[in-house]
Image: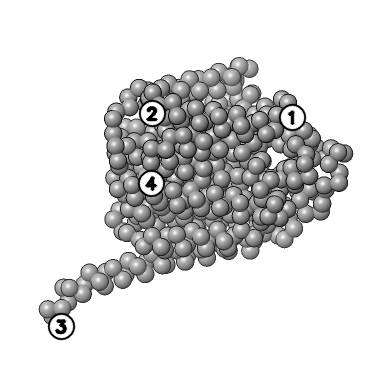
Amino acid sequence: MQELRPALEPLGKQSFFVKKDCFLGLALLALLFSAPAFHLTGSIWAGSLLRKDLVLGALAAATLVYSVAVWRALHGRPMAVWWVIAVALVARAGLVAVPPFMSSDIYRYVWDGHVQAAGINPYVHVPNDAALAGLRDAAVYPNINRLDYAHTIYPPAAQLLFWAADAIGTSVVATKIVLLGLEAAGMAALWRILRLAGLPGDRLLIYAWNPLAIWAFAADGHVDAAALGLLLLALLAQFAGRRGVAGAMLAGAVLVKFLPIVVAPALWRRWDWRLPAAFIAAVSALYACYLGAGWHVLGFLPAYAHEEGMTQGGGFWALALLGALVRLPSFAGAAYFAGCALALSGLAAWMVARQTILSGPAEMRRVCSNAGILAGGTMLAMSPHYGWYFPWLAAFAAVVPWRSLLFLGCAPLVLYADPYHTTLSIPTLVFLPGLLLAAWDFRKGHPVAA
């Protein structure tokens, strides 16, 4: 037995770590599944401030468990990929039937799909228009936000997904299933990207176990899940040399949620015409499907920017913080937006100009690093009020785990604590540490783990 003990010790340690992995996964699931129990049935929000705080408490505890799992993955504690995938899928499957109560956006998705199924262009009428009176029901229509004044804000690729979901069933669950299906395809693409980049497959958990992503996409059903899925498929197609497919997938991602356009310079290779040509062709084809609405095809987007305080400047965290200290001129919002756009454009141009001939894993890491920097910089500059805008950063962090991306991919969960944007302290808890970590990343020039 003395001779066998040295050989058995590694197996014992491995068994101990496997038990830890099981505990982390099960604890994550338990905390995520406990959150809906605090919801008051029938309430479009949690039901009360106390209930909302209890929901956030459960999700915050899940984020702590997630953080431990991420730390282990980045510090040489490998986890079985099948377990990472199993927990991710069970978490989403367990929440897909939960009625959304931290956001009502998905009711507009279902409505837009139902309007299209009736042969009506969704950009033409606001929901309470008399022309749509025959489509109203008790389950979806009363829960639509801005139903009396806002044309739909969602671009054409999103509208096609809503229409496809209506073919399955005019319900929140059917729409979630379509969106989560694309997210699942994106997670499969991310796992493949990790393997081609020479990285451990269990790093998939950096995105797949992210409580903010799981809650925002599986429970509340935000369309960002589909945008991320298409973007990751575009990345994988680009790495495979299928640049036309990459351009079409990127167009789909952008016309589900406009934000992915900011990472286009990271995907593009100088002198390559196929990606931009396919992108332009796909965008043109998708918008052509809805041109009968004229300029209404832009939807509520211009008015939304004003409603969120972007045109005045108060909707940007940095300006709001500065405005609390000094009086800002009326043009501060426009100047801030122009300055951020110029800075990000300059950064993108610098990345393109500095492109070197790389191949294999080095090329993949470079593209994902540049995409993560552009995406993270955009989110810090925009400082959205809503947590579900941020989980896509965790997908880039799985490949290049910059501290700022790891933090910003999950910390915006706290933005749910202030749904009406009445205080500056809560977004400061997100964006000030995010800026400091971004400065750390810039100064150190290397991620948490290679």
Residue ID at (83%, 48%): 136
Distance from disc 4 to disc 2, alpha carbons, whole Å, reads 18 Å
Q: Which residue is mark 1?
A: 292
Instruction: Write down the quadrant of residue 300 in the picture.
Output: top right
Instruction: Specify whether residue 372 is in view.
Output: no
Q: Which residue is mark 3?
A: 1
Kind of residue at badge 4:
Ile
Distance from disc 3 to disc 2, alpha carbons, whole Å, reads 61 Å
Residue ID at (46%, 34%): 244
Residue 129 relative to residue 46: left or right: right
Q: Which residue is mark 4?
A: 193
- Residue 283 position within the rendered picture, expressed as x and y whole percent measured from the top left: 58, 31
Q: Quadrant of the N terminus?
A: bottom left
Kind of residue at badge 2:
Arg
- Residue 447 position within the rendered picture, expressed as x and y whole percent measured from the top left: 32, 41
Please tell me whether mark 1 sits on a helix, a strand or a loop: helix
Instruction: Write down the quadrant of residue 127 in the picture.
Output: top right
In this view, the mark in front (1 or 3): 1
Tell me if mark 1 has few (under 14), some (14-19) or many (20+) residues whose alpha carbon lies within 10 angstroms of its own.
Answer: few
Instruction: Specify whether residue 230 is in view.
Output: yes
Residue ID at (41%, 63%): 82
Position of residue 397 relative to residue 259, above or below, is below
Please tell me whether mark 3 sits on a helix, a strand or a loop: loop
Name the foreground residue: 418 vs 174. Answer: 174
- Residue 51 position within the rendered picture, expressed as x and y whole percent measured from the top left: 65, 57
Q: Which residue is mark 2?
A: 269
- Residue 198 position within the rendered picture, expressed as x and y whole percent measured from the top left: 30, 48
- N-terminal-most mark, 1 or 3: 3
The answer to whether the residue labelled 1 contacts the one labelled 3, judged by CB atoms less than 8 Å apart, is no
Q: Quadrant of the C terminus?
A: top left
Q: Residue furthest bottom?
A: 1
Applied colour scheme:
one colour
